[in-house]
Image (spheres, grey):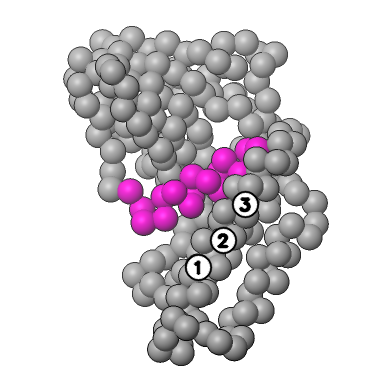
Amino acid sequence: MGDWRHETLAQLRTALPTGAVEPYGSVTGADALDPWSDLDVRVVTHEPLDVERVLGAPLWAWQGSSTESGQQLRLVTRDGRRVDLTVDGPSVLLPEPPSDVDVRFDAVLAATRLGRGNLLIGLHLVLGIGREALVQSMVRADLAAGTVHHRLPTPYDDRAADVAALTAGALDPTVALRAYELYGRWRAEVDPGYRPDPAGLVAVLRRAADRVR
């Protein structure tokens, strides 16, 4: 099986025959790649860039910021590819973000950090997701009691132990998945229109595991 970073780079060059596609970072040296490496690439284009089209997959999570000449995008596809895309061009076309896009992105970043043994940042991110999960249970407690003031324990207070249990065992990348699943399950209880979707994170974990084998 080929390396997905080089395959994605070739795909970008095919999809953008009139643009400049330049990789940088770990993909430029085989010795620098590890199972958790992403693809860093700079694209220069004079036309609007449809990100999902050029990557050939739906986006699952992302962060973006503006630069003087375009945009800096940190992308996670639904099939588990992580691409840092610097775009010098007129505009970038992105889909409507899922309502939990920030939690999704933090979960992928947490998995990556934990996978590399960067436990300080990895745990910080996991605890952030756990905090968001607790917020959903606080909302559930408020709705059940009809008030935001709780002098005595609520039926949902034992969920604090569920979040604490995320750190009870080894801090490996699957902890990020468990944190996201906890958040998704509790949010779905108070938000009828919300459906958790761990597909992109599961795919990231699978790609890293396949690379280790």
Mark 2 highlights which residue? Answer: 131
Pair 3/1: label in front: 1
Q: Amino acid at mark 3?
A: Val
Q: Is residue 205 magenta?
A: no
The magenta stretch is 97-113
What is the quadrant of the C terminus in the image? top right
What is the quadrant of the N terminus in the image? top right
Residue at the location (41% across, 50% down)? 101
Pointer 3 or 1: first along the chain: 3
Q: Give the CA separation, mark 1 to mark 2.
A: 6 Å
Crowd rating for badge 2 (residues with CA inside 10 Å; few <14, some 14–19, many 20+): some
Q: Is residue 109 magenta?
A: yes
Q: Looking at the picture, how far across and down is residue 94, in whole percent? A: 28, 38
Residue at the location (44% across, 32% down)? 74
Vertical order, 94 against 154 (above or below): above
Vertical order, 85 against 191 (above or below): above
Helix, strand or loop at disc 2?
helix
Main SS class of the magenta portion in the image:
helix
Q: Is residue 89 left or right of residue 202?
A: left
Q: Is residue 128 left or right of residue 188?
A: right
| Residue 194 visible from this viewpoint | yes
Q: Are marks 2 and 3 in contact (CB under 8 Å)?
A: no
